[in-house]
Amino acid sequence: MTDDFTYPPADFTADPDTRLMMAFAAGEDAAFELIVKRFERQVFGIVCRYMGNRPLAEDTAQEVFLRVYRLRKSYRPTARISTLIYRITANLCLNVIRDESRRRMVSLDAVASDDELSLGASIGSTAAPAEDAVEARERAEIVRRALAKIPERQRIALILHRFEGLSYAEIAESMETNIDAVKSLLSRARASLAEALRPDIEAGNL
Amino acid sequence: MGCKVKESLVSYLDGELDPAEASAVRVHIESCGECRDYARLLMLSYTALEAIEEVEAPAGFAARVKARVHRRFARVVYGLGTVVAAAAAVLIVFSITARTRDSISFTPTEMAVLTEMTAGQTDATSTYLDDVADEVDMFHQFGILTDFDVLADLDSPVGVDDFATVGSI
């Protein structure tokens, strides 16, 4: 829970995305597809950067929207729908990675798959000439590996802040914690990231 | 590495400190080389995340979500129908057996209650299925039950994978 309590409760019904969810909850099935299209880039982006594995990311991102679909029966606009979607995404990321780690321990499969190794090519790809594209892929791969070293909750907080532009308060709400905890998560995440990238920054690779 | 101000540098760079705190950190950075270097490293490493800035959802993502929703929730409805039909069948058999063996007949009031019970099965069964789904998801989240593929092979009338991934947020 966040430290920020407001009274009277905030009114989210003016938020266009929240209104879409309200329409869906009221029985307008077409609104669900609009919600998916509105949030697919954000959800997939968070999951993909967090997991560094595109196929697993797509499966998990789809699962986020299945849970949104299931919310239709109980949905009340007590928060922005974007906050709920970020919350579901964060929870699923943390759970899926936990399950995936367990599966890997059982299968003793410690080697990164082709999908993971090729992720640098699929995220951060821009329409650039061949040489620049290779360099861009290498930089993306360096960053992806550094991100993967950051502990899970810190990584989620960092992704929400850096790529989704969420404030500390919004991250706290999405991760069901308080602002001080978010400050601590982000501070440690940035320290881990800095240390992981220090050799490449000092070597001029980034 | 022991400077206490380093702990506030991320909040300072993010603009999350109040003006007085931010001013104190700014003054400190001007006189502390270690914090200045660290602030620079923090900024450069944060900027480096640009390398993974562009991520688009795969083509056809929304259509695949829609198909998966349809598959999953259609299977729940199918399962629900099976359970309701089974409950109705049990009721009919019970009714016929009771009438033939003991010559018991239902009064209009009893019939009304039975009819209502049968109709009520839909809501009751729906609630029951939701509860089971939440419990299985809880098992899943706590790692008690993790391999749902094994259960799926049992060919449950209500798709096991319907339960594997649903749950509260």
Image (cartoon, rainbow, N blue to C red):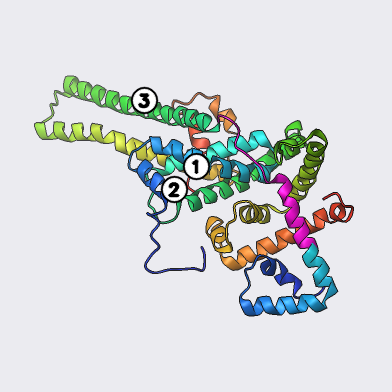
Instruction: Compute the Cα span from label 1 to label 2.
Output: 8 Å
Residue B82: assigned label: 3
Is B51 part of what is drawn in magenta? Answer: yes
Q: Nearer the viewer, residue A166 or A101?
A: A166
- Amino acid type shown at disc 2: Asp
Q: What's the residue at 70%, 40% (across, down)?
A: A123
Residue A177 image offset from top left, x and y in percent: 56, 61
Residue B58 image offset from top left, x and y in percent: 60, 33
Identify whether A69 is placed above or below A205.
Answer: above
Give the residue at mark 1: A38
Residue A133 found in image quarter:
top right
Q: Earlier in the sequence, mark 1 or mark 2?
A: 2
Give the residue at mark 2: A17
- Amino acid type shown at disc 3: Thr
Residue B39 located left or right of residue A183: right
Is B119 part of what is drawn in magenta? Answer: no
Q: Are marks 1 and 2 in contact (CB under 8 Å)?
A: yes
Give SS at disc 2. Answer: helix
Of all chains, the one bearing label 2 is A
Instruction: Compute the Cα span from label 3 to label 2.
Output: 37 Å
Q: Nearer the viewer, residue A195 or A127?
A: A127
| Residue range of the region highlighted in magenta in the rendering | B41-60
Identify whether B93 is placed above or below B116.
Answer: above
Residue placed farthest to the right in the image?
Answer: A203
Of circles 1 and 3, the one toward us is 1
Residue A52 found in image quarter:
top right
